[in-house]
Image (tube, rainbow, N blue to C red):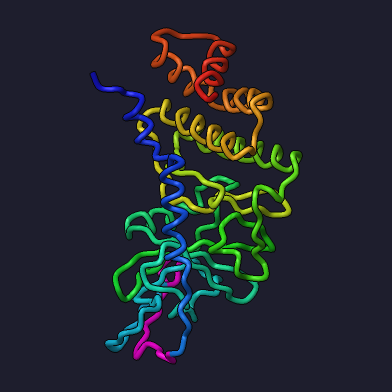
């Protein structure tokens, strides 16, 4: 008999400990900046406007250069991206960043469809999610979605902590009160997202940007509509288990987060409980069952 819970968990795609370690190891290869010895520039460029967007196309001569060279870039009017035609990162790298003026732009590799969809949906995304301001296609055909960090921030991602305005932080640097506050912000943001029947698709601390005003979720490449509300609850459970494994949340503090999540996603939690038990239950039974499966 097929184990439905395993299938649903795979749908969410929250990385296991083993997968996270593999991703961590592979990221060391991605985080290699290339020196820009070359003074290459496009031999021709074309720019036009489309609604509230600016589109710039570049043409290049044949070259052995392995840097990210822009073939096409689309971005919001007012963004400082027009002059970016080459980045000091290897074309095909998973994540890169670029300091332009007072802003840091983050480039994350994805498919063309996802990059364009995230860009088009940016204005409808809720507070607490990253500010997607554009997308680009490289000479080698790789697509990147572009987001913008607007102020001095802190990040758990070493690949991004190379600019003066982006400070690297580890979990060990946070005191208990800060960990608790951060987990509350994560739960509130995910609860709001799930209330719209959307799932992140993946979650790690690398996906968080901390600001003086709160936090943002910055890696939205796995964002999608949930086929069933129960999938949202499974993602919430996986996020809670991940935070608990890292020592970010204590078991005695988790029930508050579960109750907070249930209050904003009561229908989804009820559907999830009925799938598990085969009958409906009140709020106490539902939240107790969620806590039991998390821990």
> Is residue 294 visible to us here?
yes
Write the residue at 40% across / 75% down: 68
Which quarter of the picture shows residue 224? top left
- Using residue 142 as the reference point, say whether residue 99 is left or right of it: right
Write the residue at 71% across / 39% down: 181
Horizontal and vertical percent position of residue 220: 46, 50
Horizontal and vertical percent position of residue 219: 49, 52
Q: How many marks?
A: 0
Write the residue at 44% across / 20% down: 272
Is 281 placed above or below 271 here?
A: above
Q: Nearer the viewer, residue 157 or 258?
A: 157
Write the residue at 52% across / 25% down: 294
Is 105 placed above or below 110 here?
A: below
Provide the residue span drawn in magenta. 38-54
Q: Which part of the image, by quadrant, shows the C terminus?
A: top right
Magenta stretch contains residue 53 = yes
């Amino acid at each position: 008999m097929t184990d439905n819970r395993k299938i649903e968990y795979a749908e969410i795609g929250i990385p296991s400990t083993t997968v996270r370690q593999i991703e961590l190891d592979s990221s060391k290869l991605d985080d290699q900046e290339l020196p820009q010895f070359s003074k290459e520039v496009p031999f021709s460029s074309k720019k036009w406007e489309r609604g509230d967007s600016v589109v710039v196309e570049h043409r290049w001569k044949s070259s052995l250069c392995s840097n990210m060279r822009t073939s096409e870039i689309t971005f919001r009017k007012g963004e400082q991206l027009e002059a970016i035609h080459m980045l000091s990162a290897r074309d095909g790298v998973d994540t890169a960043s670029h300091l332009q003026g007072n802003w840091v732009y983050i480039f994350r590799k994805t498919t063309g469809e996802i990059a364009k969809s995230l860009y088009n949906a940016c204005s409808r995304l809720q507070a607490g999610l990253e500010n997607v301001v554009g997308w680009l296609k490289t000479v080698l055909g790789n697509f990147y979605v572009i987001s913008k960090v607007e102020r001095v921030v802190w990040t758990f991602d070493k690949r991004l902590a190379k600019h003066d305005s982006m400070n690297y932080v580890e979990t060990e640097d946070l005191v208990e009160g800060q960990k608790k506050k951060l987990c509350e912000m994560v739960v509130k943001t995910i609860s709001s997202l799930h209330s719209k029947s959307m799932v992140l698709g993946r979650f790690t601390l690398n996906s968080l940007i901390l600001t003086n005003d709160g936090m943002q979720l910055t890696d939205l490449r796995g964002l999608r509509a949930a086929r069933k509300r129960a999938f949202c609850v499974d993602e919430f459970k996986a996020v809670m288990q991940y935070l608990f494994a890292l020592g970010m949340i204590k078991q005695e503090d988790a029930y508050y987060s579960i109750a907070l999540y249930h209050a904003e996603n009561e229908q989804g939690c009820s559907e999830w409980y009925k799938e598990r038990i085969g009958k409906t239950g009140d709020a106490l039974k539902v939240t107790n069952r969620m806590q039991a499966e998390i821990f």
